[in-house]
Image (cartoon, grey):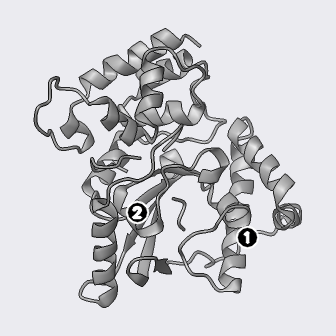
Amino acid sequence: MDTWEFGRMVRRRRDAVTPDAVGLPPGTRRRAPGLRREELAGLAGISADYLTRLEQGRATTPSTQVTAALARALRLDGEDRDLLYRLAGHAPPGSDVVPRHLPPSVQRLLDRLAGTPVAVYDAAQTLIVANAPYDALMGPTSTWRGVERNALWRHLVGPGSRVVHTPHEEDSLVASLVADLRLAVTRYPADPDLTVLVRELTDRSPRFVELWENESPRSPGETMRHKLVDHPAVGRIAVDCDALVITGDDLRLLVYSAEPGTEDAERLALAVVLGTQEPAGHDRGEPVSPPSPPRPARSGR
């Protein structure tokens, strides 16, 4: 990896991206038209200190997740994105690895839904990006790293989510997520992150091994659209979760809403206000998401 050239490219592109291009307010006392370091760090889900070390060439071998997050935050596409990957020491994403890049059209959609809880997952149900209202509803995703960002891992190995499930619903969801992962492994055989994820789940979850070896097909209608979220500050909120599949890029965009005029809508609005106004008490390490500036985009599910 050419750490100095990688850092120079990140710094150069940071200086060239204006706040309004990424959905941030221009603010005052801005000495340069580009993004502040803490703004880019927040958009990419990493700490400002780690970004500083990357830009100065003092941090080496950023992961593919960090590289993808920076490319996304800087709105890089095509040759520029591929160049950033090469400078980081990674092969640019190909057709045999899971797509994790947000195309400009999806980023624009996220910008338009800045006040609505939204998360984007890849084909293996690994969280790519979540916006501030989503974190306010489901809990902060900023400190999740590696396999922790995968929905199946969080249900079988990790702490789960704020969504309330009956035992039957939980079993159906897990079986569905296993089916999604199996399909992703078949479709993207060269993806190293999938290899790590399957190995981690195999080592730590007997339930995963049972389902993985069973190879049961996904049953129709197992995806729950209506969800009950147990929010620590406002109580339980009934929400609808609509999944939009971005077919060309194999992404899943989850949008959460409540029926207008209901108590659930009021609770959802309050949860978003409380979550987005609280000062961020979690600093970001390698990947993490911004405190004060609004973010364009946890595995809640």
At x 53%, y 15%, the residue is: 87
Of circles 1 and 2, the one toward us is 2
Q: Secondary structure at mark 2?
A: helix
Q: Amino acid at mark 2?
A: Tyr
Looking at the picture, tell me which residue is in the foreground, 227 or 161: 161
Count residues near mark 1 (Cα–Cα under 10 Å), then give few for <14, some for 14-19, many for 20+.
many
Residue 187 visible in the displayed image: yes
User: Which residue corresponds to the image point at 57% horizontal and 26% vertical from the top-left?
Assistant: 62
Q: Amino acid at mark 1?
A: Ala
Where, by quadrant of the figure, is residue 176 drawn?
bottom right
> Residue tagged by mark 1?
175
Which quadrant of the figure has residue 274? bottom left
Q: Earlier in the sequence, mark 1 or mark 2?
A: 2
In the rendered view, tell whether residue 10 sits above or below residue 158. Answer: above
Q: Callout 2 environment at 10 Å: few (<14), some (14 to 19), or many (20+)? A: many
Q: Quadrant of the C terminus?
A: bottom right
Percent position of residue 103, x then y: 40, 40
Q: Which mark is residue 134?
A: 2
Q: Residue at point 50% right, 45% down?
A: 249
